[in-house]
Image (spheres, grey):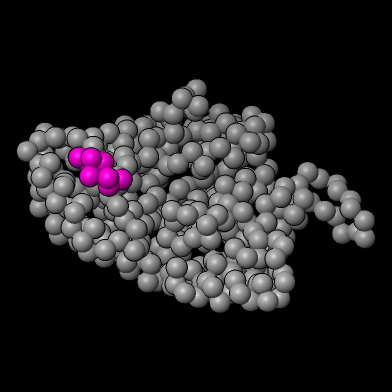
Amino acid sequence: MSGLEQQYVQEVFASNWIAPLGPQVDAFEQEFCAVTGAKYALALSSGTAALHLALRLTGVGPGDEVLVSTLTFSASVNPIIYEGGRPIFIDSEQESWNMDPGLLEETLAARARAGKLPKAVVVVHLYGQSANLEPIMAACQRYGVPLIEDAAEALGATYRGKAPGAFGKAGIFSFNGNKIITTSGGGMLVSDDKAFIDHARKLATQARDPAPHYQHSEIGYNYRLSNILAGVGRGQLAVLADRVQARRDNFAYYEEMLGHLPGIQFMPEAPWGRHTRWLTVLTIDPAQFGVDREVVRLALEAENIEARPVWKPMHLQPVFGSYECVGGQVAEAFFRDGLCLPSGSSLTAEERGRVAQIVRQAHK
């Protein structure tokens, strides 16, 4: 916590404006636009809710295909299923670990030849780093397919000086408890299209029509963020730059302490932008390091230190196993060898030192 959160929350209680919506929500949306460069923003109960609304408003329906990064968390894919769509998974590239623009282009070209273009593309900005948006956007524009950016993990990152999430038809962000800033639970939908956000705002508030009585002409959702949590978000947003720097400091320390060890490679920072290092992620080549990723993870666990494997690709998940994947070997290798080290903004020097020491001791 920055200390500002309590001030804003006290304003909520002083005004007795506790229910969802209110001045803190309005201010949070405006301040978020200022930070990201997006023209319009909608504060919601989660990043998943934001993605669901984006897909619904893009017209995804039963049987429609949506191309989506395979190296991600399931929340990037679940809303496609909510609407009856079919995810088609696209592999990663080595430079940023994000969606491979070449594979995306090939897939769109093949779908165009078959006369069945996907309804949308969902690109995920992984672990605090932007995907290579220029070729991805160019491919989407060439075939007239809307681009939705899942920037849940990448608030504070840049792509050629601009915030990822503010390039496509819509962008989504998460303020879950593990993100770089948090409202405990919450999310944001952004777009430069005012009508898009206005419609999303209506759907997120149970799709109530403008009338003195309760009238509904379309299905809606209870997806708005509470005024209290928006106050927390405003306090967090004010120190976003500090949180990014703290994460980057964690990475710099780990790289200095571990980067010289044989077989260890850190997730690279691509030349097109600034990586927040939301998580410090590395891969371990067991042939060079002497043991595999899992041995290192268990050594940390034995000392009550949580480290996790890289996301298990969506095409390997039992629930999504029946859907097509283009490529997959790159993401599979990252999952096999990848490890996420403790990366919290409040991590102390002593705690980082313990992590590095255990990893070094595991080296054979």
Q: Which x, y percent locates residue 312?
A: 38, 35
Q: Is residue 343 left or right of residue 219?
A: left
Q: Nearer the viewer, residue 122 or 305?
A: 305
Task: Classify residue 286 as left or right of residue 64.
Answer: left
Q: Which residue is the extreme one toward the top? A: 322
Q: Position of residue 123 (x, y in %)?
A: 47, 47
Query: Which residue lies at the image location 78% right of the left edge and 43% below the top edge?
Result: 219
Q: Quadrant of residue 78?
A: top right
Question: Which residue, as the protein is rendered here, is positioned at the far left?
Answer: 364
Magenta residue span: 299-306
Q: Tell me which residue sits at (12%, 41%) in the image.
A: 362
Most extreme residue toward the right, as rendered?
212
As rendered, which of 184 and 106 lies closer to the eye?
184
The residue depicted at 16 percent of the width and 47 percent of the height is 358
Name which quarter of the figure residue 34 lies in. bottom right
Identify which residue is drawn at 54% across, 73% down. 6
Q: Quadrant of the C terminus?
A: top left
Q: Position of residue 118 (x, y in %)?
A: 57, 37
Closer to the camera in the image, 313 or 19: 19
At which x and y percent is residue 29?
A: 61, 68
Residue 74 vs residue 129: left or right? right
State yes or no: residue 305 in magenta. yes
Q: How many marks?
A: 0
Q: Is residue 200 magenta?
A: no
| Quadrant of the frame with the N terminus | bottom left
> Would residue 141 be visible to someone looking at this image?
no
Is residue 185 visible in the rendered structure shown here? yes
